[in-house]
Image (spheres, helix red, strand yellow):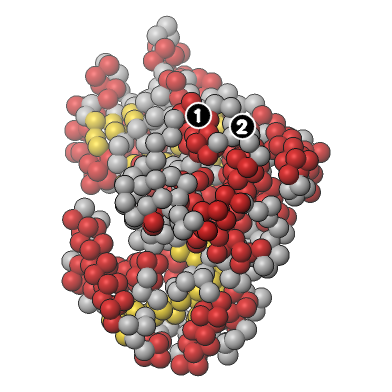
């Protein structure tokens, strides 16, 4: 394959997933050939796409007109015509191996030799589909989540013979489609998402069938104790009980061990398939019309949430130990694919790995489920039992910090300002702890930490300095406090790794000054930013004056500081204080996406570029040019620069090591 540039995409199947994938591709500028068996099906698909585009346009989420996007989509009942000029083909028909394999065989015979063949399957092994084609190295899984237009996650699944280049092209295409790709490194039944989903279902079913809890109780615990957007049984209804049953059978037939769920079997036999039929585990106003299920909060009081997630955590450990996925991959899937407020393994660390093992043993002894995975047993033996111990699936710093939390999930380090009851107001202890954390991260090797993100716990990034810190200070003491704050922001600005401020709620006074010392600022739509010190008879004292002038110029900086004005996130973006504004529910995912993109770049190059940019913002032209030339020449001595040049010449993705 020669440095494939995807321009035309064929989508086979015009159903819910197919027309959604076609819409996403067209929105992002690709020419799309949509194929299905009849013109009636294709016309319904086009109608659904136009309706969706009109909604997006009406909400201001689509820059082009619906007509412009629609002009990039053509339809045909001929599979051969659909794939003839395609660079990338995505099959999105129902979960039937015979149907899918027939499509793959025909597509491989008629598509250009360079074209990649992808399946949107959620359960059928990619290697089996690849075996019927004339290009197994160019066959891959590209599992979108429903609805494709809204869901950010894509699972990119390697088959046994899938080439690295096919994976790289697919991951890059996923990003061009505005998605967050997670690579499934081995072609295991159910990939990552459905292996975890089926374990959640297994726990829920066993608890109900074993008379431990009712359906309402399980879903109440999922919603109100774990904070999930839907209960487990509610989610099964939403997906479709028949669809879940079909996926589960495909996985079990290929070796996935499952205790069984008579509850699902009974619903399938009764044709009560969930939302699509108007009734499943719950009743709905009418077939296909969703209304949020009413589950009493008190119903789940007796349900242990650890029991509900234990089998899924165990499955995640299996995936990690067998190098199918990483810790971050698992949590990305559960957050972006399932809508969890935090990752499955973050939950495990929070509750404690020992508690998970206790529930696994109880489930094994009562129901004959799987043994606790060797990975989590090893973690306990090593004392890595979660947040309280300082490490579990993640590293929490282990330094006994009180006002900040440090979580390292390579390649990202997350610093959380942790005084939520005070809106993360900055006091002396926080300053000292932040300086210690920044020093620690500066010494972390690049193979462990490449990007740092600072965020706030609770309802705000930081509402500023804790005024009680200054209430009894003499002028000399206030001067020293200001210098200590400046030392903190200077260390942050000079850190040898990119730093992103993830801003929600208030970022005022010293909180905004902290964010201004970061390299990028991503804010949620609800954020309020400002330097209101003048209204208290003070001025900014953490370096914010200079940094604000650098960002927006002297005139605007004077206006904001002298009036103490507060800005909305959008106003801050327009002035250049904030790099990007996103809805609050997308803030962490957007920040993570940007951080991971930065982490792909050569870290020494980023370090030197950051230093030169800082000089450029303050120094003379001659100083900047000299620094630029020195940095440019220095980088030629690094292994990363040789890797980047060689990768470009060899038409492959570079692998930077920070050397």
Q: Secondary structure at mark 2?
A: loop
Q: Is residue 104 above or below residue 544?
A: below
* Residue depicted at x 58% and y 71%: 124
Query: Would you name the residue on which mark 2 appears?
Result: 304
Q: Secondary structure at mark 1?
A: helix
Label disc, if present, on residue 82 of the rendered structure: none
Seen as rendered, the residue at the extreme right is 381
Query: Would you name the residue on which mark 1 appears?
Result: 299
Residue 348 at x, y = what percent?
63, 39
* Residue depicted at x 58% and y 90%: 134
Residue 329 as seen in the image, left or right of residue 540: right
The quadrant in which residue 392 appears is: top right
* Residue depicted at x 34% and y 55%: 287
Q: Is residue 298 above or below residue 453?
A: above
Q: Nearer the viewer, residue 546 or 163?
A: 163
Task: Locate the C terminus and report the quarter of the image it occupies.
Answer: bottom right
* Residue depicted at x 51% and y 53%: 267
Q: Nearer the viewer, residue 175 or 212?
A: 212
Residue 291 at x, y = what percent?
33, 45
Q: Is residue 153 above or below residue 395?
A: below
Residue 187 at x, y = what percent?
64, 69
Residue 618 as seen in the image, left or right of residue 396: left
Residue 544 at x, y = what percent?
35, 33
> Can residue 150 be seen by looking at this rendering?
yes
Mark 1 Cα-neighbour bin, 10 Å: few <14, some 14–19, many ≥20: some
Residue 481 as seen in the image, left or right of residue 290: right
Earlier along the polypeptide chain: callout 1 or callout 2?
1
Q: Nearer the viewer, residue 12 or 236?
A: 236
Q: CA distance from mark 1 to mark 2?
A: 12 Å
Q: Is residue 456 above or below residue 255?
A: above
């Amino acid at each position: 394959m020669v440095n494939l540039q995807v321009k035309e995409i064929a989508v086979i199947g015009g159903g819910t997933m197919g027309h959604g994938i076609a819409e996403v591709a067209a929105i992002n500028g690709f020419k799309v050939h949509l194929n299905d068996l009849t013109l009636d099906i294709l016309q319904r698909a086009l109608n659904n796409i136009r309706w969706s585009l009109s909604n997006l346009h009406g909400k201001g989420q689509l820059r082009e007109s619906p007509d412009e996007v629609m002009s990039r989509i053509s339809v045909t009942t001929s599979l051969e015509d659909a794939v003839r000029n395609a660079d990338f083909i995505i099959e999105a028909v129902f979960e039937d191996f015979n149907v899918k394999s027939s499509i793959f065989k025909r597509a491989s015979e008629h598509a250009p030799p360079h074209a990649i063949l992808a399946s949107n399957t959620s359960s059928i092994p990619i290697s089996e589909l690849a075996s019927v084609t004339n290009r197994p190295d160019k066959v891959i899984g590209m599992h979108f989540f429903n609805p494709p237009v809204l869901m950010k996650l894509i699972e990119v699944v390697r088959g046994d013979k899938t080439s690295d280049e096919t994976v790289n092209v697919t991951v890059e295409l996923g990003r061009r489609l505005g998605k967050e790709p997670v690579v499934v490194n081995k072609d295991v039944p159910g990939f990552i998402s459905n292996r975890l989903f089926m374990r959640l279902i297994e726990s829920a079913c066993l608890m109900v069938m074993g008379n431990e809890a009712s359906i309402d109780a399980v879903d109440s615990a999922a919603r109100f104790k774990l904070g999930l957007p839907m209960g487990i049984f509610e989610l099964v209804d939403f997906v479709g009980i028949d669809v879940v049953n079909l996926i589960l059978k495909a996985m079990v037939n290929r070796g996935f061990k499952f205790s069984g769920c008579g509850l699902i079997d009974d619903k399938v036999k009764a044709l009560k398939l969930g939302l699509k039929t108007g009734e499943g585990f719950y009743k709905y106003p009418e077939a296909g019309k969703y209304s949020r299920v009413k589950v009493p909060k008190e119903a789940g009081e007796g349900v242990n949430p650890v029991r509900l997630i234990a089998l899924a955590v165990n499955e995640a450990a299996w995936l990690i130990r067998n190098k199918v996925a990483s810790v971050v991959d698992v949590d990305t899937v559960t957050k972006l694919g399932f809508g969890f407020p935090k990752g499955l393994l973050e939950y495990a660390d929070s509750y404690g790995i020992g508690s998970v093992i206790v529930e696994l043993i109880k489930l094994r002894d009562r129901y004959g489920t799987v043994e606790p995975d060797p990975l989590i047993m090893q973690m306990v033996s090593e004392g890595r039992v979660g947040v309280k111990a300082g490490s579990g699936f993640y590293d929490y710093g282990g330094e006994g910090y009180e006002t900040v939390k440090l979580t390292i999930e390579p390649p990202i380090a997350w610093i959380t300002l942790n005084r939520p009851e005070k809106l993360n107001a900055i006091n002396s202890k926080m300053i000292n702890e932040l300086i210690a954390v920044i020093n620690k991260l500066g010494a972390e090797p690049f193979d462990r930490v490449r990007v740092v993100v600072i965020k706030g716990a609770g309802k705000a990034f930081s509402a500023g300095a804790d005024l009680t810190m200054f209430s009894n200070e003499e002028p000399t003491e206030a001067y020293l406090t200001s210098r200590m704050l400046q030392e903190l922001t200077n260390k942050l600005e000079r850190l040898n790794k990119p730093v992103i401020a993830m801003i929600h709620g208030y970022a005022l006074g010293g909180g905004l000054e902290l964010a201004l010392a970061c390299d990028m600022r991503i804010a949620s739509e609800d954020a309020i930013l400002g330097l209101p010190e003048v209204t208290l008879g003070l001025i900014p004292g953490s370096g914010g004056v200079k940094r604000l002038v650098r960002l927006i110029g002297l005139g605007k900086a004077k206006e904001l500081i002298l009036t103490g004005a507060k800005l909305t996130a959008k106003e801050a973006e327009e002035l250049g204080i904030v790099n990007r504004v996103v809805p609050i529910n997308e803030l962490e995912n957007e920040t993570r996406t940007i951080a991971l993109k930065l982490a792909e770049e050569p870290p020494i190059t980023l370090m030197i570029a950051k230093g030169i940019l800082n000089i450029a913002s303050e120094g003379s032209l001659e100083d900047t040019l000299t620094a630029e030339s020195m940095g440019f020449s220095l980088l030629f001595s690094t292994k990363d620069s040789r890797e980047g040049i060689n990768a470009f010449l060899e038409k492959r993705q570079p692998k930077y090591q920070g050397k």
